[in-house]
Amino acid sequence: MILIVRHRTQTPSLPGAREIREILKILLYNPDNGVTRNFMPHLWMFLLQSLTPTGHDVVLIDGNAQPMDEAGIARYVLEQKIDLVGIGAMTRMIAKAYRMADAVRAVGIPVVMGGPHVTEMADEALGRDGGPRHADAVALGEADDTWPRIVEDAARGKLRDVYAPVDAFGQELKPSLKQYPVIPWDTIDLKQFNLVPKSAKHWLQKIGEGWGTFRIVPVESGRGCPYGCEFCTVTGFFGDSIRFRTNESVVNELLLLKARARKERGQIAVFFIDDNFAINIKRTKSLLRDIIAAGAQVNWVAQISANLLRDQELVDLIAASGGKWVFIGMESIDPVNLKDVNKGFNKPEEYAAVLQRLAQRNVYAITSFIFGMDNDTVGAAERTLEQVRTWPPGLPIFGLLTPLPGTPLLKRLADAGRLTRPKHWQEFIPFAMAHTPLKMSIAEAHAEVKYGWSHAYGPEAIAQAVDSLADQPLGYRINIFIARMCFRGIYFPMLGRFAWWKVISENRQTIFKLAKQGVEAWWDSRTKAEPAPATSAGD
Ligand code: B12
Ligand code: SF4
C-alpha cells in the first residue's frame, strides 16, 4: 500500500496531545447518476468540508458536473497527491461508487464511504457479506460528529472499519443542528456547478441584474420526518425526531448566497432539501417571516407534503419569501395504493385544490408519482395524466416502486418472496422494477412509466403547459418551458449535445412562439419608454 506522507503537525483537536499526524489532502467524491447532469450539487460534500478539522485540504468532485471513470479517478488521486477519499452515494449510484472506490484503493489510497446506502449495507461495503471489500471504513448515519474523528484517525493512519454516531453508552446520537457550521458559500469554488454554458456567460452577465452564473444550491433547515412511508428511507435514517437549525443560521446562509450571486452578476436559487419543509408549520412560518424581514429572499424550491399545504397563511408566506416550486410526493391518485404504502395522509381528492392555491400565488408544483404499486393496473399512467391535465401546469415526474435497503417495503416484499432482483443496486438499471406488482406484470409497469414521461414531456404537452400560462408574464412561460426541458432529462438521457439538439428541434414551434413574444415585449417596452412626440399647439 502506498502511503503518501507530506506534512506533519501536532493534532490541534486533542489538547495537549503529542501525537504526530499528517496533514491530509482529502477528496470528497459523489458518483454521477449515469442518466443526466444533476441540476444541483450534493450538500453532504459541502457540509463535511466545513466540518473537517482545520489544517487539512479538501477538494470536491461531483461526477454529475465533472464526469470521471475508474481510470480517471485513479489518475486524479495520484496526480493530486490525495491521501484520503470520501465517497457518498444513494443506492442507485452505489455500483458506480464501489467501482470508483475499488480503483482508488487499488492505487493504495484509503476510502471512507458514507450515506444512506452503506448505512444499511455496511457489510456489503466492507466485504463482510462474502463479496469484495470496497471501503476501508464506513460512516453510519449522520456523520456530522463522526467525520472529524474519521479524519483525525486517518491522519494518524488508524482508520477503524465502522464509525457509528453513538455516545459512550452506545446510544445513537443525532446532531441537534443548533450548532450548524457556516458553509463558506462566499469563497467555495463553485465553478463546476454553474448551469450557464461558458459560451453564453459573458453576454448573459450583462442582462438585467446579471445571468452570468446560475446555480441551484442545497440548503437544509431541518432533518427528520415522522410519517414513515413504507418505501422511504428517511424515517429510518434521520429518525422521527425532527431537528431544526436556528432561523438565524438559515437566514445568514441565504444572505451569504445572495451576496455571492450579486457579486458575480449571477443568479442563485435554493433547494431546501428538508424532507418535509413544513413538517412543523409554526416553525416554517416563523422561518419564512424571518427570511422576509431580513430581505434574504431568494427563489427557492422545497419538498412539502400536500396535507400541509391546506394552510392559506403558509402558502402566502411561501410566495412572499421567494418560494417558486414545491415538490409534492403525490405518489398515486388511488387511495388504496396510498394506504398500502402507509401514505394514507395524502388525499387525492384535494390535490387539485392544493395546486390551485399555489398557482394563484404563482407557485407551481413538481408532482411525483410512483407506478407499480400493488393496486395499479394497466392504464394507471393515463388515468394519472387525465388528472394532471386538469391541474395548473407543473412538472410531473414518474418513478417505480423501488424496495430500498432499510425500508419496510423491502422487508415486506422479501418476506413474501416477491423480490425478483433482491440486490437490484448491484446491477443498477434505471426505471426497472425489482419485484412483481400484484395486478400487472413488470413489463406493464415499465410501460406505464414510459407512457407517463412520453406524454407529459412530448412537444404537444410542453406547448400546452406553456400556453396555459398565456395570461401570465412571459417570464413564467419561459420558466415552465426551460424547466420541462430539463426535467425531461430525468427519464430521457440528455447527456450529449445531439440529445439537446433533437429536443430543441422537436419543440421548435414553442421556442419560436416564445422568442416572438419576447421580441414583441421588448419592442413594446422600448416604444412605451420613448417620450411621446411633441404636438404643435395648433393640432
Ligand atoms: C436533495 C435530494 C435529492 C436531489 C439530488 C441530490 C442532490 N443533488 O442533493 C434530487 C431531488 C435530484 C433527488 C433525486 C432522487 N432521490 Co433524493 N434525496 C434528496 C434528499 C431530500 C436530501 C439529500 C441531502 O442533501 N440530505 C442532507 C445531507 C446532509 O444528508 P446526507 O446526504 O444523508 O449526508 C449525511 C450522511 O448520510 C453522511 N454522508 C453522506 N455521504 C457521505 C460520504 C462520506 C464519505 C461520509 C463520511 C458521510 C457521508 O454525512 C452527511 C451528514 O450527516 C434525500 C433525503 C434526505 N433527507 O437526505 C433524498 C434521498 C437521498 N433521495 C433518495 C432517492 C431514492 C432519490 C431518487 C432515486 C428518487 C427517484 N425515485 O427518482 C432520485 C434519484 C436521483 C438521481 N437521478 O440522481 C433517497 C435515497 C435512498 C437510498 N437508499 O438511496 C433519499 C434518502 C430519500 C428517500 N425517500 O428515501 N434527491
Ligand atoms: S413524507 Fe416524505 S420524507 Fe416523510 S416518510 Fe413519507 S416519503 Fe419519506
Image (spheres, rainbow, N blue to C red):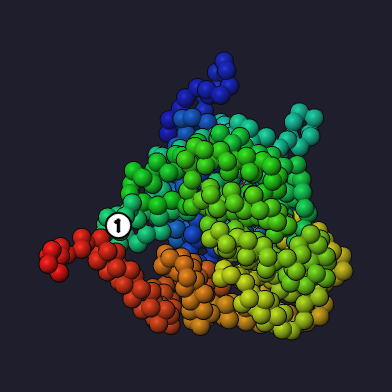
Location of residue 68 in the rendering, given as x and y in whole percent from the top left corner: 45, 60
- The residue depicted at 69 percent of the width and 42 percent of the height is 282
- Please state which amino acid type lies under the numbered disc 1: Ile
Horizontal arrangement in the rendering, residue 279 relative to residue 505 (left or right): right
Q: Residue at x 57, y 18 (%)?
A: 15
Quadrant of the image occupied by residue 91:
bottom right
As drawn, which residue projects farthest toward the front? 538
Up-down: is 409 above or below 323?
A: below
- Find ligand 2 in the image and state its quadrant: bottom right
Q: Position of residue 2 (x, y in %)?
A: 49, 43
Kindly tell me whether residue 253 is visible in this rendering: no
- Residue in front for this viewpoint, 260 or 537: 537
Marker count (numbered): 1
Camera-nearest residue between 396 and 36: 396
Q: Locate the C terminus and report the quarter of the image it occupies.
A: bottom left
Residue nearest the viewer, comparing 151 with 3: 151
Kindly tell me whether mark 1's CB lies below 8 Å from ligand 1. Answer: no
- 497 on left or right of 525: right
Q: Give the image location of residue 499, x and y in percent.
A: 43, 76
Q: Secondary structure at mark 1?
A: loop
Rendered position, 314 above or below 438: above
Q: Dot 1, crowdedness within 10 Å: few (<14), some or many (≥20)?
A: few
Which residue is pictured at 69% across the width and 52% down the height? 311
Residue 196 at x, y percent in the picture:
37, 59
Residue beneath label 1, please?
207
Q: Residue at x 57, y 15 (%)?
A: 16
- Classify residue 167 by image quadrant: top right
Task: State which quadrant residue 142 falls in.
Answer: top right
Most distant residue in the top direction: 16
Instruction: Name the residue at the right extreme.
Output: 416
